[in-house]
């Protein structure tokens, strides 16, 4: 088998198997897999407006994914990205509520984006300080801060920000139109500004990691923090800036959810997009181009599956089942490929043991 | 002691049981040097399967066995990926966390809100007659008694048997254990799957005993992460893990008592953040050395006899892989 065929095989086979597994799960749930797949594709592509819905998932997903490439490069597991989205959405909502009636759209949007970046970046900084200064692993700090951000959002929605006509704890009152990202048209309900920001983020992160001293420091920190520190790399500073950049991008993603998708603040406004971004980056192995493409495929699945409940009375979590299975099998296939590529070493006469440290250990 | 206080203490022991079982399971896995990060998803999926199986077969035992099989299967994937395929255990664990939670939600959609029986209360004769202790510890469903047995067994196995010594060795110094003839990777498989089966049982404990029934989102969401944090707080020692689980359940009970008190002016919504602040707090207690300093104030002879309980370092080879050749 030639190298190229092998490479394509190891990329395609896991995807096909995960489609089969998902089909099996759909059958177990008592539905017709073909009807489900058809419904998802129709949900994503039946009209420009439907595809606009897909793009509206892609924009926050791509923003979070690019942020996570930065933290992964520095060797950090920023599980807190969900909470950073929520804090970004809260901060942007705060600006929209307080200034929405008094300022024009052109002045509001930059203020809201800035607030979202500060909200998300600041929330990420807490995880960073817990990690670098206080020795709490970022996975635990992140999980806790995710929950706290959601608790805070629900408190605001059911308390101080509850609609004057009486709250159902489902959302705040709709924000004034001037405070929202403007949609391109009724047929294509996407903010071109949001699209531009996402594309700019992709470009900037790719360039910053490739050609700047900061990117080099991040890589050194991620590869081996101890040796990097000995070589004079400011590892703590690298880790903290990585967290803040990721948090700021996640914050913008959160503002897009609040100020375009919903037009108000809602509980669990991140909708799992931050976690999904972690999967995207894992499967793309932190490569920007692949990340962008896989984010688009996952956005199609996400956007298409919003119709499942209406069309087939199936739970939307099926999207997560398919995405999770694909990622799991791709990672397993990668392992298998590396395993097979290893040359068979002859057994040494005396047993020699080696222990290799993996990229990330739960307790540092 | 008033009957109300006894009731509260009884319910703390009861509601801490899944955290105890999952925490001990993860302790065994991590002592062998493997991280099973998937707890939050594993608990949800095994809880759902355990509930559905018990509902369909009408047999609690079948439900628990099915839940244990699910937990073991998830752990097997992690072991396979980490040991055989040399993938990052944390990455695989995280993917499984999300995947299993979604699977539980999708496959459980027909079971939400279905009424069910819960495991019957079975007071132990004689023991439950002991004043105070009997009412707190020996008036529960069987699964709570199993958790006591598990605690003692795990402690005895780890610190007083030869295979237990080997288990600790493969998590601390796999090379040395290998040189002494231990089959490091095979033992890691065994203990990862065993730990996963216990996590599965903990999942069944939620839906069959603690909060009977299946809901969306599941009632135990978030507890997997808490159990992982409790293992760290517990310094990978079964006794301290149990202490952490009871402490946590106790503070949770306290916060729900506060919620019911109308004279206290904290918004209900904010109180839900308490467990998470607590989680960061307990981890800070360990990571900043505060807990160690506190324990060092104990008199010397006590410290010596408690040495294995007092240490807080993770197993040295945790999350690493081992190549014998």
Image (cartoon, coloured by chain):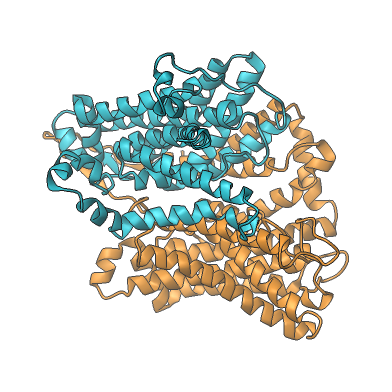
Name which residue lies at 35% across and 71% down. A236
Compared with residue A210, is residue B155 higher up or lower down, i.e. above or below?
Answer: above
x, y percentage for residue A198? 64, 70
From where the camera sits, is residue A182 visible? yes
Percent position of residue B163, x then y:
22, 25
Image quadrant assignment for residue B21? top left
Q: How many marks?
A: 0
Task: Inspect this view and state whether residue A353 appears.
Answer: no
Viewer-nearest residue: B286 or A311? B286
Determine the residue positioned at 57% across, 53% down. Answer: A275
- The picture places residue A327, in percent across and down from the top left corner, at 54, 45
Residue B203 in the figure: left or right of residue A302: left
Identify the residue shown where x is 42% and y is 60%: A76
Residue A274 quadrant: bottom right
Judging depth in this view, the residue of A314 and B43 nearest the camera is B43
Q: Quadrant of residue B267?
A: bottom right
Q: Position of residue B292 (x, y in %)?
A: 25, 53
- Is residue A55 toward the left or the right of residue A203 in the image? right
**Chain B visual colour:** cyan
**Left or right: A25 with respect to B21?**
right
Instruction: Give chain A's shade.
Output: orange
- Against A265, residue B81 (above or below) is above
Q: Which quarter of the rendered picture does the C terminus of chain A lie within?
A: bottom left
Residue farthest to the front, as pictured = B2
């Amino acid at each position: 088998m030639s190298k190229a065929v092998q490479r394509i095989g190891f990329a395609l086979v896991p995807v096909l198997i995960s489609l089969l597994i998902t089909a099996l799960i759909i059958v177990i749930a008592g539905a017709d897999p073909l009807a489900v797949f058809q419904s998802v594709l129709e949900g994503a592509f039946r009209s420009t407006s439907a595809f606009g819905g897909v793009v509206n998932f892609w924009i926050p997903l791509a923003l979070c994914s690019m942020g996570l490439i930065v933290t992964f490069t520095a060797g950090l597991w920023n599980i807190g990205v969900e909470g950073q989205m929520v804090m970004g959405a809260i901060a942007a909502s705060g600006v929209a509520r307080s200034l929405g009636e008094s300022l024009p759209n052109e002045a509001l949007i930059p203020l809201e984006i800035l607030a979202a970046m500060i909200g998300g970046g600041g929330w990420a900084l807490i995880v960073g300080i817990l990690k670098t200064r206080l020795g709490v692993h970022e996975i635990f700090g992140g999980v806790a801060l995710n929950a706290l951000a959601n608790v805070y959002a629900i408190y605001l929605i059911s308390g101080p920000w509850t609609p004057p006509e009486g709250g159902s704890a489902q959302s705040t009152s709709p924000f004034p139109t001037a405070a929202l990202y403007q949609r391109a048209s009724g047929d294509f309900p996407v903010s071109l500004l949001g699209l531009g920001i996402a594309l700019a983020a992709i470009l900037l992160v790719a360039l910053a990691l490739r050609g700047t001293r900061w990117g080099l420091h991040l890589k050194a920190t991620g590869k081996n923090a101890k040796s990097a520190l000995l070589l004079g790399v400011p590892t703590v500073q690298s880790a903290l800036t990585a967290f803040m950049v990721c948090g700021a991008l996640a914050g913008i993603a959160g503002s897009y959810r609040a100020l375009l998708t919903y037009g108000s603040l809602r509980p669990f406004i991140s909708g799992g997009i931050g976690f999904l971004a972690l999967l995207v980056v894992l499967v793309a192995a932190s490569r920007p181009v692949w990340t962008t493409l896989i984010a688009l495929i996952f956005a199609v699945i996400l956007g298409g599956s919003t119709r499942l409940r209406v069309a087939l009375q199936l739970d939307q979590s099926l999207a997560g089942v398919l995405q999770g299975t694909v990622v799991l099998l791709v990672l397993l296939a990668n392992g298998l490929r590396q395993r097979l590529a290893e040359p068979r070493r002859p057994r040494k006469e005396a047993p020699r043991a080696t222990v290799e440290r993996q990229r990330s250990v739960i307790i540092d | 002691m008033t009957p109300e206080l006894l009731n509260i203490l009884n319910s703390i022991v009861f509601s801490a049981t899944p955290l105890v079982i999952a925490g001990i399971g993860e302790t065994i896995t991590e002592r062998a040097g493997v991280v099973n990060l998937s707890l939050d998803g594993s608990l949800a999926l095994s809880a759902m399967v355990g509930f559905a199986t018990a509902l369909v077969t009408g047999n609690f035992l079948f439900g628990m066995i099915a839940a244990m099989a699910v937990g073991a299967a998830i752990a097997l994937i992690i072991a396979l990926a980490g040991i055989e395929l040399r993938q990052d255990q944390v990455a695989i664990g995280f993917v499984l966390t999300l995947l299993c939670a979604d699977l539980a939600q999708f496959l459980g959609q027909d079971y939400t809100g279905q009424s069910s029986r819960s495991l019957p209360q079975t007071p132990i004769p004689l023991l439950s007659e002991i004043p105070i202790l009997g009412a707190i510890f020996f008036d529960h469903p069987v699964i709570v008694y199993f958790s006591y047995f598990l605690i003692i067994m795990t402690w005895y196995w780890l610190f007083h048997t030869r295979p237990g010594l080997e288990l600790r060795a493969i998590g601390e110094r796999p090379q040395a254990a290998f040189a002494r003839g231990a089959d490091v990777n095979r033992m890691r498989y065994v203990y990862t799957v065993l730990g996963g089966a216990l996590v599965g049982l903990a999942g069944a404990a939620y839906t069959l005993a603690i909060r009977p029934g299946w809901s969306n989102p599941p009632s135990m969401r978030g507890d997997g992460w808490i159990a992982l944090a409790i293992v760290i707080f517990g310094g990978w020692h079964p006794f301290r893990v149990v202490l952490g689980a009871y402490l946590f359940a106790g503070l949770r009970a306290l916060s729900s008592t506060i919620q019911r008190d109308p004279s206290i002016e904290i918004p209900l919504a904010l109180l839900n953040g308490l467990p998470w602040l607590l989680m960061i707090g307990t981890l800070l207690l360990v990571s900043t050395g505060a807990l160690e300093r506190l324990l060092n104030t104990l008199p010397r002879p006590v410290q010596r006899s408690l040495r294995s309980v007092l240490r807080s370092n993770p197993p040295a080879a945790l999350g690493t892989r081992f190549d014998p050749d």
